[in-house]
Amino acid sequence: MNIPAITTEQMREVDRLMIESYGVELKQMMENAGINLASLARSRFLGGDPRGKRVIVLAGSGGNGGGGLVAARRLHTWGAKVAIYLTKSASEMRGVPGDQLDILREMGVPSCQGDQVEHLPEADLILDALIGYSLSGPPRGAAAKLITMANQHGVPIFSLDIPSGLDTTSGQANHPHIRQPPR
């Protein structure tokens, strides 16, 4: 199957048109992305039933992270044991991602700043919502640390939009970048 691709600039234009021309708000786009990520994670990686399954969500502070946090909320309501690892402190999360994190915290879903941990706990699946199409250069700081820990974990990693660390226009794999564990 040949899947069409678009460049980073084309994706920015799609987002701009969605908001400015079609009236689809950023909050709606993140909600749709997160619902679909959670649904696919449930059917493809969690055997159709996420109850009791352990899911780690790696979330950045932008739109990709917002979509990942929506997915975390959905999986939690379906019975998964979700833990969230952020690239920034909870107090630094703003806009729609910050709103989603506030909802999750009210629901009792644990979260912590990724650069404050040395390893990720046991899990059945990792959702990668760290960096979307806005990547500029190699991942740094907490994002780089979380990518490295995810790659060392050994469980399937399911990325929203594109694996964090890949350049969406050139396809270049920066160091580090999300990789699938060997089977």
Image (cartoon, helix red, strand yellow):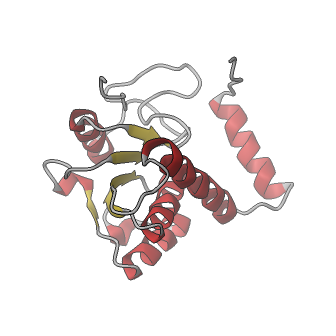
The quadrant of the image that shows the C terminus is top left
Whole-percent x and y of residue 142? Answer: 28, 48
Whole-percent x and y of residue 139? Answer: 36, 36
- Specify whether 18 is left or right of 136: right
- The residue located at (56%, 56%) in the rendering is 34
Q: Which residue is farthest bottom?
A: 106
The quadrant of the image that shows the N terminus is top right
| Viewer-proximal residue among 29 and 98 | 29
Q: Which residue is farthest right?
A: 21
- The residue located at (42%, 30%) in the rendering is 137
- The residue located at (68%, 41%) in the rendering is 12
Whole-percent x and y of residue 23? Answer: 82, 62
- Specify whether 15 is left or right of 172: right
- Specify whether 81 is left or right of 41: left
Relative vertical location of residue 147 with respect to residue 69 in this rendering, above or below: above
Q: In which quadrant of the rendered view does residue 106 lie?
A: bottom left
